[in-house]
Amino acid sequence: MLWFISFILLFIFNLCDKAYSLSIEKCPSNRFKCEKIMSFYKEFNFQPIWNEKRIETLKYLVKNSKYEGLNSKEYEINISNSTIENELNLTNTLIKLAYHTYYGRVNPSKVFERWDFPRKKDRVLKVLSDLIKQDKLEEFFEALSPIYKDYKTLKEYLRLYYEIESRDDGDRIELKNKLKPGDIHPLISKIRKRLYLTGYLDSYTESNLYDEKLEKAIKKFQELHNLESDSIIGKATIKALNMRIKDRILKIRINLEKYRWLPENLEDKYIWINIPSFELDLYESGQILMHSRIVVGKKYKEDFRPTPLLFSEIKQIVINPDWHIPYNIAVKDILPKIKKNPEYLINDKIKVFLNNEEVDPLKIDWTGIDEKNFNFKLVQKAGKKNALGKIKFHMPNNFDIYLHDTPQRKLFLHKVRTFSSGCIRVEKAYHLALLLIENNNKKELNEKKLKEALNSEQTVYINLKNSIPVYILYFTNIIKNSELYFLEDIYEYDKMIAKYLLN
């Protein structure tokens, strides 16, 4: 008799198990991520995974997703009377939150035309199943969030700004004239309050005197907003002061999102380029080997030539490179100069080719040449006037851009350095080349040989034994010495990301 009862119970269990499995297979794809759900439940033999403890943990994760820069309202949990419906709802929410945490809410390839990064390996469902099997679902964010140190620091600032958001009065500071140390003005008190609220002043008084303590705070504020640290409160400083806390929160969320687009781990040695801060850093074993100012692509609406965001590798260094002038630069920049003075080409050592044969530029009637009939190839020969300077760092990519030296050294003195046509000009090109060549481990390539090559006008190609990864990025929040910087959205990419992030 007992064996018969056992058989009946086992039959009922298997029947229920099969019914549950079939219910999962009938998952309505218009509401749920059914393909992901099916793959996920295979890890559990299509058995229910949710109990009271796990549901409470999921609620906790959803609530705290805002501190990861996500919108917690997007992951609202709906509990119904249907067991299967609840199972699907909870699992769908978990998977959605997991993928947003790991890959980001926004697909960058759909936002930017000039974007080229490899997509990191999908390990999301495996991580989720491991966390549940090990009863460690509370470690969800640690397991799926970016591991970068600056990402974690940025999250701490996000939490801080959420805490002070309610204290933001939202009043704008309207200042017609500039203020300098020693001035007395009724708006000084308001400026003090704003700096105190955002942590640039450690105490607040209603004094209207621009004193030494306020000057120190203003200089720090200007530095952390990539402004001239001159202590003068002018238009740019007031604009930064008027940035509301809710807007700072959004900017931090946008930049946390950008970290999710990156690889899980970076190589031991690599180049990190950030466009809005106009900086290049060469890293090795987590330490900065060298730092350099850079010039990036133009930001102007009437002449927009942004530097693309991409991953590549420097495989070759060219000493004394010729510059094969791209068509767009030739017709937009060079052609107007030629029309004013055809001898410009000769003076700047630019050769003209038609059908792969060199032609005399002085025998061409340039007055009738425009963008439609410009069939020439322009090549600037190596020399002091060459736009690429003395060094070119070649890295294969879909946009034909590269790093290079420049004879226009004065451009590095500007705070905002958007002067190129997309390529990146490196202030310390020689130092970078030397460090990369040292990494090449070839006896014939040393500092003496490099200097000899640079002092000549002979073009020398150096193929690197160990290619150097390059990451060209766009962070408008950066961390330096644990301080948070707010940088100008020079290409207005943050506005584009915000539209996707908030919808």
Image: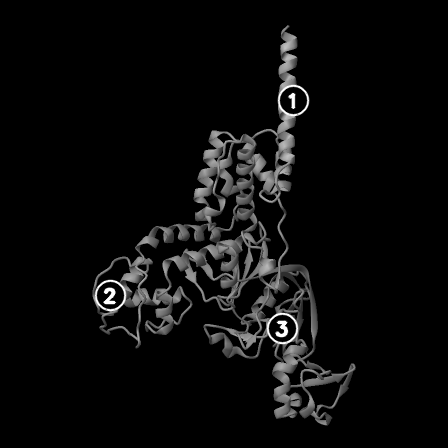
Using a 10 Å C-alpha cutoff, classify the residue at mark 1 as few (fewer than 14 neighbours), some (14 to 19) or many (20 or more).
Answer: few
Nearer to us: label 2 or label 1 = 1
Q: Quadrant of residue 2?
A: top right
For residue 304, which quarter of the picture? bottom right
Question: In the rendered image, which residue does mark 2 sit on?
Answer: 189
Display coloring? one colour
Residue that mark 3 sits on: 391
Q: Amino acid at mark 2?
A: Ser
Note whether residue 384 is visible.
no
Q: Is residue 331 left or right of residue 417?
A: right
Counting from the top left corner in percent of width and height, residue 157 is at 40, 53
What is the C-alpha distance between the residues marked 3 and 2? 52 Å
Residue found at the far top of this picture:
1
Residue positioned 49% across, 63% down in the render: 495
Occupied quadrant, residue 217: bottom left
| Numbered label attached to residue 14 | 1
